[in-house]
Amino acid sequence: GRVWAEPAPVAPVPQAGADIILPPEVLAQRAAEEQQRREMEKQAEQTAREVAGEARKAGEPADRVKEVIGDVIRGLERDRPGTEKTTLPDDPQFRRQEAAIQQVASESLQRERLQAVERDMVRDLNREKTLGGD
């Protein structure tokens, strides 16, 4: 015989970094991205319904419907404004980029300081060479 049972409840898995409070800008961007995704799905479904209706009338194969839907989705993704994502300060890539910027800036600053010290030394040596000083 068969055994009928309810599936075991699945406990939600805590996400890594779930205790981090996100800035309002990031939350707003995520909400906007979610809204855009919903609109895109809605338009894709509407287009699919329209194409399916036309396909039934014209007798087009289902592959053509899938192709048209794919074209619509790609067009919407391409036309979507603001696809640039905000980087979080905790992002490892963001940290590496900031570290590289700091390293380049500090090397440049060290070079400028060394050149200033060299100029001062040359000036002091030239003063010592002249009779009577400044």
Image: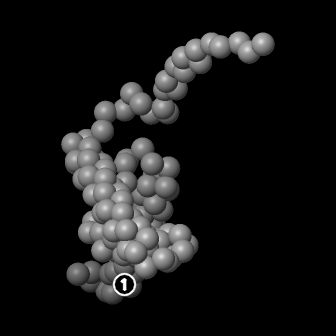
Nearest the viewer among 57 and 8 is 57
The answer to whether 106 is drawn above or below residue 2 in the figure is: below
Nearest the viewer among 120 and 30 is 30
Percent position of residue 103, x then y: 47, 62
In the figure, is residue 28 to the left or right of 37?
left
The answer to whether 131 is drawn above or below residue 85 in the figure is: below
Taking the spot 30% from the left edge, 74% from the top edge, the residue there is 79
* Res 47 → quadrant: bottom left
Badge 1 crowding class, 10 Å Cα cut-off, few under 14, some 14 to 19, many 20 or more, is few
> Mark 1 sits on what residue?
126
Nearest the viewer among 100 and 26 is 26
In the figure, is residue 36 to the left or right of 90?
left
What sort of colour scheme is used for the picture? one colour
Percent position of residue 27, x then y: 26, 44
Nearest the viewer among 89 and 15 is 15
**Is residue 105 visible in this depiction of the protein?**
no
Q: Specify the farthest residue to the bottom.
A: 130
Taking the spot 36% from the left edge, 84% from the top edge, the residue there is 126
Taking the spot 40% from the left edge, 75% from the top edge, the residue there is 57
* Res 17 → quadrant: top left
**Is residue 19 visible in this depiction of the protein?**
yes
Q: Amino acid at mark 1?
A: Asn
Percent position of residue 40, x then y: 32, 61
Quarter holding the N terminus?
A: top right
Taking the spot 31% from the left edge, 33% from the top edge, the residue there is 21
- Mark count: 1
Percent position of residue 115, x then y: 40, 76
Quarter holding the C terminus?
A: bottom left
The answer to whether 19 is drawn above or below residue 56 in the figure is: above
